[in-house]
Image (cartoon, rainbow, N blue to C red):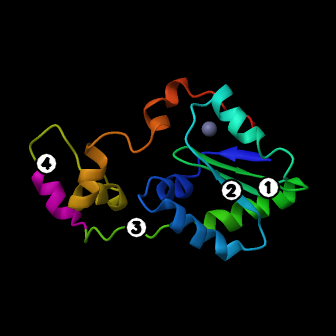
C-alpha cells in the first residue's frame, strides 16, 4: 500500500465536476476497484474514513483534496498500479504561449533580478488563468497545512 500526494489526483479532485471526471479517468483502468473519500483532516478523522474500506481491498482510494492510496498484493503490483493511475489521471498543461528568454532578460536588465533559465517555470505567470489559480489562495485544505502534515506512512 502506498499513500502519496499525487499532483494529478489532487488537480482532478479540486474540480467542481470531480466525481464525473475521476470516474471517467478511472474507467481507463477499469480492472482496478476504487472509491473516493471526502476531505477529512489528516489524522484520526481521515483514518476513520479510510478504515471503512479496510475489508474491501479497494485498489485505489482517491482522497479528495489530499492525495491517493494505492494498494496491491506485492510491491511490484503497487508500483504498477501507481504508474497506471498516475497516467490515467494525467492532465495536459494549459497552453501559456511561448516564453522569450531574451525579452525576459531585457526586462530585468539593470535590476537585482534575473529571469529563470527554465522556460517551463514562467508558464504560471504567462497565463491569466494560471495567475488567478496561483494567487487566489489554497486550492485544497492540506495545501496550507503541509508544514504540520505528518501522514508520511500509509494509513
Ligand atoms: Zn497525506
Q: Quadrant of ligand 1?
A: top right
> Does residue 154 appear left or right of residue 131 in this picture?
right
Question: Where is 78 relative to 43, above or below?
Answer: below
The part of the chain drawn in magenta is 99-108
Lower position in the chain sequence, tag 1 or tag 4: 1
Q: Quadrant of residue 130?
A: bottom left
Secondary structure predominantly adopted by residues drawn in magenta: helix
Q: Are marks 1 and 2 in contact (CB under 8 Å)?
A: yes
- Report helix, strand or loop for mark 1: loop
Q: What residue sits right under mark 1 in the picture? A: 58
In this view, the residue farthest toward the right is 73
Observer able to see residue 28: yes
Q: Are marks 1 and 4 in contact (CB under 8 Å)?
A: no
Local crowd at mark 2 within 10 Å, few (<14), some, or many (≥20)? some
- Report helix, strand or loop for mark 2: strand
The residue shown at (30%, 51%) is: 133
Q: What residue sits right under mark 3 in the picture? A: 93
Lower position in the chain sequence, tag 3 or tag 4: 3
Q: What residue sits right under mark 2 in the picture? A: 35
| Residue 49 rendering spot, x and y as whole percentages | 69, 39
The residue shown at (73%, 74%) is: 30
Amino acid at each position: 500500500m502506498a499513500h502519496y500526494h499525487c499532483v494529478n489526483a489532487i488537480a482532478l479532485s479540486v474540480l467542481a465536476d470531480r466525481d464525473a471526471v475521476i470516474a471517467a479517468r478511472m474507467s481507463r483502468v477499469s480492472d482496478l476497484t476504487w472509491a473516493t473519500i471526502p476531505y477529512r483532516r489528516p489524522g484520526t478523522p481521515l483514518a476513520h474514513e479510510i478504515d471503512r474500506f479496510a475489508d474491501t481491498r479497494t485498489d485505489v482510494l482517491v482522497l479528495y483534496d489530499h492525495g491517493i492510496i494505492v494498494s496491491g498484493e506485492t510491491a511490484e503490483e503497487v508500483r504498477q498500479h501507481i504508474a497506471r493511475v498516475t497516467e490515467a489521471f494525467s492532465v495536459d498543461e494549459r497552453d501559456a504561449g511561448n516564453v522569450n528568454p531574451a525579452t525576459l532578460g531585457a526586462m530585468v536588465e539593470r535590476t537585482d533580478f534575473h529571469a529563470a533559465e527554465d522556460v517551463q517555470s514562467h508558464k504560471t505567470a504567462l497565463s491569466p488563468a494560471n495567475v488567478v489559480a496561483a494567487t487566489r489562495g489554497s486550492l485544497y485544505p492540506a495545501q496550507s497545512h503541509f508544514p504540520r502534515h505528518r501522514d508520511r506512512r500509509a494509513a
